[in-house]
Image (cartoon, rainbow, N blue to C red):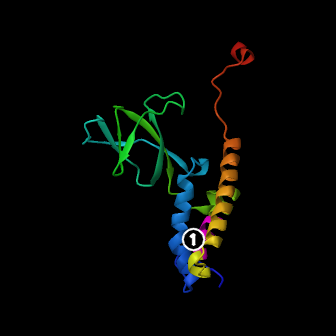
Amino acid sequence: ANVITIDPPGSSIEEQLCQNFYPIARDELLELHAWDFASKRAALTQLVSTREDFAYAYALPGDCLKPRKLLPEGYASDSESEVFELEDNVLYTDVPTVATLVYTYKLTSTARFTPLFTSALSLRLASYLAGPILKDATGRVQTLLMQRALALLGQARASAANRDTKRSTHTSTARAAR
């Protein structure tokens, strides 16, 4: 059957399966890497810490899928991440004033996905769908699709790393002389 829509789900079993498995597959792949298209920064709301090993607690943003870095107030670069732990959607740290949390958010707009990410996501979704649709008791098809998805995911990560631009901390002598 052709899948016409998954939101709202159509009447076919394939459309219903896609609606069930798509958000799982999408969030799995988003969580695996700090994708620039799914990254956000946010100031955190302070809570009362209930733990003895950390003095401060902060609420995570509602759309946070995976926290990546905790940047202190007045940070000069993204490499200055502070130590933190997560427990029950609360971020614990010893940093009294947190300027910024860098995190991966639950991105639902497919228009922001890169082509390689989209291909990896398609294969990951197909691996979920293969079992119920093909009724493959051996799991060979699911395994093959998962392997292909992971290979494409590796290519997508490499591509994202190669297009990542970092600010230089070095000032050339020519620039300094200007």
Compared with residue 25, is residue 141 higher up or lower down, i.e. above or below? below
Outermost residue to the front: 138
Q: Nearer the viewer, residue 80 or 131?
A: 131
Q: Nearer the viewer, residue 162 or 167?
A: 162
For image coordinates 57% across by 49% down, the residue present is 33
Residue 144 rendering spot, x and y as whole percentages: 67, 66
For image coordinates 45% across by 55% down, the residue present is 63
Residue 76 rendering spot, x and y as whole percentages: 52, 27
Q: Nearer the viewer, residue 19 or 171?
A: 19
Compared with residue 34, is residue 100 higher up or lower down, i.e. above or below? above
Q: According to the image, label 1 marks what residue?
A: 128
Outermost residue to the right: 174
Q: Residues within 10 Å of mark 1 (few under 14, many from 20)?
A: many
For image coordinates 28% across by 34% down, the residue present is 55
Range covered by the magenta-colored residues: 122-130
State the quadrant of the N terminus: bottom right
Residue 174 rendering spot, x and y as whole percentages: 75, 16
SS of the residue under disc 1: helix
- Compared across the picture, whether 152 is left or right of 15 comes to right
Residue 150 rendering spot, x and y as whole percentages: 64, 57
- Compared across the picture, whether 64 is left or right of 123 comes to left
Name which residue type carries label 1.
Tyr
For image coordinates 36% across by 32% down, the residue present is 97
Q: Is residue 126 magenta?
A: yes
Viewer can see residue 29: yes
Question: In terms of secondary structure, what is the magenta stretch mainly?
Answer: helix
- Compared across the picture, whether 48 is left or right of 72 comes to left
